[in-house]
Image (cartoon, grey):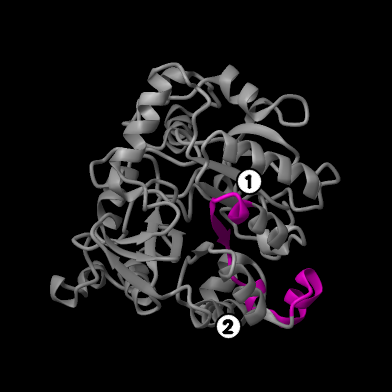
Amino acid sequence: MPGDNLFKVFDDEKGNTSKKDPYRLWGIDNYGKPELDALRARRDAGDKTAILSVCVSMTRMCNVRCWYCYALHNKSPNPEQLSLEEYEDLIEQSAQLGAKTMIICGDGEPTYDRKLLPVMRMGAERGMKPVLVTNGTVMGHDDLAKQLHGVEDGHALAKAIYDTGASLLVKLETLDPALYEEILNVPNIWGKFERGVANIVDVGFGETWKEPAGTYTRLSFTGICTRQNKHEIPLMLDWSRERGGQYICKVPSPTGGALEHTDDYLFGPAEVHAVRDYIAEFSDKRETLTPIVLDADKCMTCLAWHLGPVITEDGHYVECYTSTTNKFGNIREKSLAELIGQRGQDTGFDNPCPIKDRLYTKLIAGEQTQDPSLIQLRV
């Protein structure tokens, strides 16, 4: 592995290797303090159901097997997945409560779901900005794109997604084809990723524009920093910028498949703080779903924690995509307003990603505790 000198190959004169001009993703980073302060005021005034986002989960099926996946061993079809009519009802309720962004993710690969395009269009029709989390490979696999979505090829799928007004969060863990296939545990998948990214850029996702707040794009590349790829972090920033993309690098959530690699690939809890300090030099922000206006002030407000609910593919309201054990009810049984209202919402807006830090706390403690007093611990 290259030495640490590789970590400093870029300098400020290149213009894209520091957070002096971070790229902002449309749909997440366009929220400024006025909108967030208004949300806080509504909640402080007693409106606990006020939201700015909703996180909608699609299929748990996936075409890759990333070793760090929080849902690694749960990739079969879910017979209890919401119907299109139920997705539409959820989206309508979310819009009525104030959601302006719809995050589309889940326990699998959303582009593997035949319902994806209709669900994205439902959100867009109700004034939401869809933000799709994807590995990008189906958009580079013509036969699969046609089979799943009835489009001509992967390029046409990318264009159909683009036409919903969506932004993309594309998983990027390495630029080494062999390592990419090792991490995703699928042979010959790099070629699909490479072509998928080419199609994504070609249809317009990589176009950038300037606004008073900064440089905006509809394309973000997001990944984790491990012992396998730490030396590539500056290179992945440069690669992302060449394609008009934001770049986000973060420490992984120690859950699911990642817990099987705490001794080899993951950095230990005692190292996480230093690793975060290092990747902060190259990452546009610390966490994927944190509006950048708050990240700049070290306020880690999250669209999947503070700003709106996460709904699983079978309708459960849960804490986070990576924390589905604690359930707060199901939208098949109660309205979204009732579910959010009975749980309440954290209006502190100034703590780090509480779920991830809780998981690292568990590693430090060496036990599976649910003690809420540990949520605020920074590692």
Instruction: Say which element carries label 1.
Output: strand
Camera-nearest residue between 150 and 113? 150
Point out the stretch of residues depicted in magenta.
123-151
- Quarter of the picture containing the C terminus is top left
Residue under the point 23% across and 68% down: 17
The image shows residue 104 at horizontal and vertical percentages of 60, 52
Quadrant of res 161: bottom right
Is 147 magenta? The answer is yes
Image height of 353 relative to 88, above or below: above
Three-letter amino acid code at the position of disc 2: Arg
Pointer 2 local density, CA inside 10 Å: few below 14, some 14–19, many at least 20? many
The residue under label 1 is: 56
- Quarter of the picture containing the N terminus is bottom left
The image shows residue 308 at horizontal and vertical percentages of 52, 36
Camera-nearest residue between 81 and 40? 40
Image height of 250 relative to 307, above or below: below
The residue under label 2 is: 195
